[in-house]
Amino acid sequence: MTVEKYQALGNDFLIVVDRAARKPLDVEFVRRVSDRDSGVGADGVIRVTPGRDGADLTMELRNADGGRAEMSGNGIRCMVLAAIRAGMAAGPEVTVTTDAGLKRVWVKDEGVTVDMGRAVLGPERRHSMPGWRQREVAMGNPHLVLLCPDPEEVHVAEMGRKLEQLRPGGMNVEFIAPGPGKDELRFRVWERGAGETQACGTGSCAAAAAAHAWGLVGRNVIVHNPGGDLEVELTDDAALLTGPAEHVATLDIQP
């Protein structure tokens, strides 16, 4: 099987371009190729097939553990570029059917923008540690955003693993703090099914929405992921995510 490896700020994906829709993703295959020791290595595997119901493309996403995920802001940018490269879509505007609904994507010279849909804020939860706040945010997939004094001081692997399990089926966990500049956020993330990653698009949108609700940032936010910066524009109806994505390699692997 030929797969394309793409990455967006270090958040990496293997893309299976399936023009004929005949290559379903097997859970064991996903786990094997995603393994960074014995496989290719990736945070997830994405299958792109022709669109349905008027969309240009259809996206199927599985995390590195083989579990199906609804949406990835970084992954969809990588997938659209792979589809354009393969001639499955023309751009610059592409519509994609996902498990989180229909998404619109625009390929620009300065990056790729995705309409991620509206961030739905859940009720704020009490936190036992002084200076911490937390609330759930839905971005088509579930998130728990925690405001803390300094994300760099957080043991993300320990806390993220525990907090992920607070919701049946798991959730993504973000640790944020304002700064260093105005309308900017420091950010680290634990992704369900993948662990701590270098960047997270849905997580950046969730973090921006929560921080805006807390009065910490405006509507245009720079989220400093460990792998680089993502831009989030919050409107009344959507979170618009902009960032880079690039092709890494074309690989032939055993199915």
Image (tube, rainbow, N blue to C red):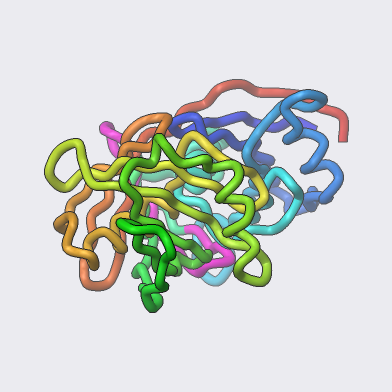
For the point 37% across and 74% down, the residue is: 124
Q: Is residue 158 left or right of residue 222?
A: right
Q: Nearer the viewer, residue 90 or 167?
A: 167
Image vertical order of residue 127 relative to residue 193, above or below: below
Q: Position of residue 244 (x, y in %)?
A: 37, 34
> Which residue is at a point 30% across and 56% down the rendered structure image?
131
Q: Decide if residue 235 is on the left or right side of residue 165.
A: left
Prevailing secondary structure class for the magenta stretch in the rendered image: strand
- Is residue 76 shown to the viewer in this render? yes
Residue 194, percent from left and from top: 64, 44
Range shown magenta: 96-111
The quadrant of the picture occupied by the N terminus is top right
* Along the line of sight, the residue nearer the viewer: 184 or 32: 184
In the shown orientation, is residue 89 left or right of residue 32? left
Asked if one can make out residue 80 in the rendered structure from this viewpoint, the answer is no
Out of 26 and 187, give the one closest to the viewer. Answer: 187
Snapshot quadrant of residue 170? bottom right
Using the image, determine if residue 248 lies above or below residue 114: above
Most distant residue in the bottom direction = 123
For the point 65% across and 23% down, the residue is: 250
The percent coordinates of residue 63 (x first, y second) are 67, 48
Q: Is residue 99 magenta?
A: yes
